[in-house]
Image: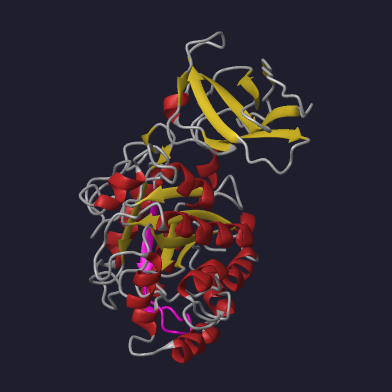
Amino acid sequence: MKAKSLLLAFIFLFEVSCNNHQVENLRFEGDLFAKNILTIRFDSGNNSATPEINWYMSTSAEGGWEKLPGISTGEIVLLTSYVGKYLKCEIILPEKGDKNLTASLITSKPVGYNGNSNTDWFRDAGFGIMVHYLNTAIVPDGGPKEWNEAVNSFDVEKFADQARQAGVGFVMFTLGQNSGYYCSPNAIFDSIVGVKPGDLCSYRDLPMDLMMELKKYNIPLILYLPANPPISNKLVSEKFKYSFGKDSATSQYNQPILEKMIREWSLRYGTGVRGWWFDGLYSWNAIRSTRMDMSLKHNISTHTLAAKAGNKQSIVTYNYGFGKIQVNTPYCDYSSGEKQTIDEIPESRWVEDGVQWFLFTYLGEKWGGKGQQFTTEVLVDKARQIVKNEGVLCLEVVTDAKGNLLPHHFEQIKEVGKMLGKIR
């Protein structure tokens, strides 16, 4: 059962400067359970000053505080490693001269654990579909004109109705991938790259239109993005100061840009987007190791907070690549689950505490394939086993530019929906 707003806090420490500024109404907002976001709020007469924010953890409210590295924002994602610990947030406001105004607040009780209620809807959904709607797949030889024409042609009403007919529990959809083309406007991206609206980011906000149409049938939307800048567009690589043609670690120059782009989308879509699936944080590449470096100001925490800016209850995962279902980062709400087939069945709902079991594969003979990997009988049986054990299954389907599902893919997911009793 989800506890509501139980965050009272105590211990105020002030070092007041000669300017008589004060930190007032210092308070926490959010549920004090792992996998939620805790926010520090306060009022100050010195509104122009940028505060320094530090977070600490201890087994006691009386002392023994350990500083949490890489957490310098007014929000903190409560990790399962914080369970049983008190948290303290310290606010330092610069004043004239060498004096500072300092205040701190401690949670009234330790961080608790109650699973991850943000994933309850996901577990209940059971299965969903994913679409790689990318210009490389839809208009591989086209430019801005062809891309905008394709995006404009996507029939969200028909697509959403197909999802309804198949009993789909959620839809995962690409914002973009490696080419630098996106199916949604983004002012931050356009500004950095130095292009006009419609040049790389489509004029139409396809995810917004899709989100609104899916909402009519209570089908949530999850968005897909790589965790690094596009690698196949030379102009974008130059402007982002990022490697061209290969994955590499993000820097403290381009990582903040990525976060601003994600935040722009997240704030625009708000609670209409229920999750994010970030690709590319593989164990063998530098993207993951850099993102997990908490000595850097922009890291896995700031990336996650950017994704959750518009919806604090949205769920996030970071892809580790093919392999056994596992947890890639402490910030994951569900396993990324990328598989070339369905070769695992969950033993329980949780991969580990607070992380929903999730498997993601393709219906075709490969990613983006127009064939058929499974017989319908085998697919339905595997889906039944996964959902019975409280796992979640996602199946990549292929559409044309207008969003029409391949007929045999449509027929297969309808059989899954029928077996699971999801047909609306």
Q: Position of residue 90 (x, y in %)?
A: 59, 26
Between 334 and 264, the one nearer to me in the picture: 264
Residue 399 located within the stretch drawn in magenta:
yes
Quadrant of the image containing the N terminus? top right
Range shown magenta? 392-407
In terms of image quadrants, where is residue 424?
bottom right
Residue drawn where x is 39% and y is 80% of the image: 135
Residue 21 forms part of the magenta stretch: no
- On screen, residue 400 versus residue 326, left or right, reads right
Q: Is residue 184 above or below residue 253?
A: below
In the orientation shown, which residue stands out farthest toward the top? Answer: 62
Nearer to the camera, 423 or 266: 266
Tell me the residue at 33%/64% (across/down). 242
Q: Nearer the viewer, residue 56 or 127?
A: 56
The tally of labels here is: 0
* Position of residue 246 in the picture relative to residue 212 (left or right): left
Residue 186: percent from left, percent from top: 55, 70
